[in-house]
Amino acid sequence: MESVDIALCLAMDVSASVDFEEFRLMVGGTAAALRDPAVLAAATSGPRGAAALALLLWSGPGQQDLAVGWTRLADAEGAAALAEAIENIPRLPAAGATALGEGMAAGLAVLARAPGDPTRLVLDVSGDGRHNAGRAPGPVRDLAVAAGLTVNGLAILNEEPDLLDHYVAEVIGGPGSFAMPCGDYVDFAEAILRKLRRELLGGGLVV
């Protein structure tokens, strides 16, 4: 892969709390965001004019799937192809517990293999529940921060209205890190659009 400014791994919760309709809203919303010219403009705003994106789905311990491998985002054709790939992914792995820390660890492993010599490595975690199985997220976040990575969070509040507090305390960290709330899956498309623009442009404060 040619050089990129940022490698961004989207790590999405597909645990038992996420039903099929919510899953389709999540991946459909992500695809819609990637088709928005504002996201492409953000992805190409750096000196290398490109970003690399990958999509990881996670559930219980040992249940993670790299649904879409590293893809270079540098033009409208690439954005359209990536959007289509995400929109049509199957729901894998199987629904299970919310192993948030394990999902984060899997995302860091994906970032460790990022191509294109990126100058920034960012893990984007989306979910609707607190960690309840496997490795705790806090120590995984600390490993990411020690390695110079950034972990951001999108907390979907339909099941746990105070989930944003958990993401702020246990998930996010690193240069320019932030957490955003999303009221429900019907709001996911608008939330992930704002989040992607912010991440690709290079940071922001916790909101």
Image (spheres, helix red, strand yellow):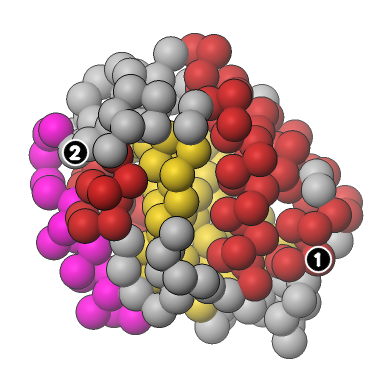
The answer to whether residue 89 is left or right of residue 92 is right
The amino acid pointed to by label 1 is: Ala
Query: Which residue position holds label 2?
Result: 131
The span shown in magenta is: 132-149
Quadrant showing the C terminus: bottom left
The answer to whether residue 190 is left or right of residue 157 is right
Q: Position of residue 34 (x, y in %)?
A: 73, 47
Q: Position of residue 188 (x, y in %)?
A: 58, 34
Residue 38 painted magenta? no
Measured along the vertical axis of the image, is residue 67 above or below residue 136? Answer: above
Q: Residue at x 24, y 31 (%)?
A: 98
Measured along the vertical axis of the image, is residue 29 above or below residue 15? Answer: below
Residue 141 painted magenta? yes
Q: Quadrant of residue 75?
A: bottom right
The amino acid pointed to by label 2 is: His
* Label of residue 41 in the image: 1
Q: Position of residue 164 (x, y in %)?
A: 33, 46
Q: Specify few, some or many for label 2: CA neighbours under 10 Å numbering under 14, 14-19, or 20 or more.
A: many
Q: Which of the two labelled residues, at mark 1 and mark 2, occupies the earlier sequence position?
A: 1
Q: Residue at x 41, y 64 (%)?
A: 206
Q: Residue at x 77, y 71 (%)?
A: 44
